[in-house]
Image (spheres, rainbow, N blue to C red):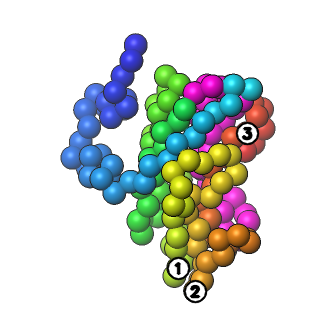
């Protein structure tokens, strides 16, 4: 059965759900065929230490569309769909204390790529960042 991803949780998209989509950033992730059954996770990091998040299994060979909505709330909202699967959720917002932020300009991302980076007063685009949100693919049976 195919469901519209907006309907996936409650049968109807609320005005609040639609408003979040207007403020969301969109990314594309190509899942290699050999990574069928891997877990897709949005990984919040503060000084390299992972913070609470959740993950869901992906279908190898599929293309995932990821929507990420970030603001000054305690959690980052996200939704992704692809490979016959829809996932919505939240993860810890590691940027609450950041004074400087940047969002990835490229919409095509792979495992290990950062989506958002932050710092106290400046941001490194190549070296380690104090605050970061990464997308990861981990093999089945591992803890992301």
Q: Is residue 58 above or below residue 130?
A: above
Which residue is at a point 62% across and 58% down the rendered structure image?
Answer: 114
Q: Are marks 2 and 1 in contact (CB under 8 Å)?
A: yes
Magenta range is 35-62
- Identify the mark at residue 138; answer none if there is no mark: 3
Query: Residue 31 location in percent, x, y?
Result: 63, 33
How crowded pointer 2 is (Cα within 10 Å; few <14, some 14-19, many 20+) is rated as: few
Which residue is at a point 49% across and 43% down the rendered structure image?
Answer: 66
Which residue is at a point 48% across and 39% down the rendered structure image?
Answer: 65
Q: Is residue 140 above or below residue 73?
A: above
The residue pinned by badge 2 equals 121
18 left or right, relative to 118: left
The residue pinned by badge 1 equals 100
Disc 3, SS: strand
Disc 1, SS: strand
Q: Can I make out residue 37 in this image?
A: no
57 part of magenta stretch: yes
Spatial CA span between label 1 and label 3: 29 Å
59 left or right, relative to 67: right
Q: Can I make out residue 62 in this image?
A: yes
2 left or right, relative to 141: left
- In the image shown, does 69 or 103 lie closer to the viewer? 103
Spatial CA span between label 2 and label 3: 32 Å
């Amino acid at each position: 059965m195919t469901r519209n991803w907006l309907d996936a949780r409650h049968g109807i998209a609320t005005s609040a759900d639609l408003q979040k989509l207007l403020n969301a950033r969109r990314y594309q992730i190509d899942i290699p065929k050999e990574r069928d059954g891997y877990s897709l996770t949005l990984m919040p990091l503060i000084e390299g230490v992972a913070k609470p998040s959740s993950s869901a299994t992906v279908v190898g060979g599929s293309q995932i569309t990821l929507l990420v909505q970030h603001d000054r709330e305690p959690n980052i909202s996200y939704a992704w769909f692809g490979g016959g699967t829809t996932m919505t959720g939240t993860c810890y917002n590691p940027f609450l204390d950041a004074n400087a932020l940047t969002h990835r300009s490229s919409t095509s991302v792979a495992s290990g790529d950062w989506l958002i980076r932050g710092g106290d007063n400046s941001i490194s685009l190549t070296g380690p960042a104090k605050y970061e949100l990464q997308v990861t693919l981990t093999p089945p049976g591992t803890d992301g």
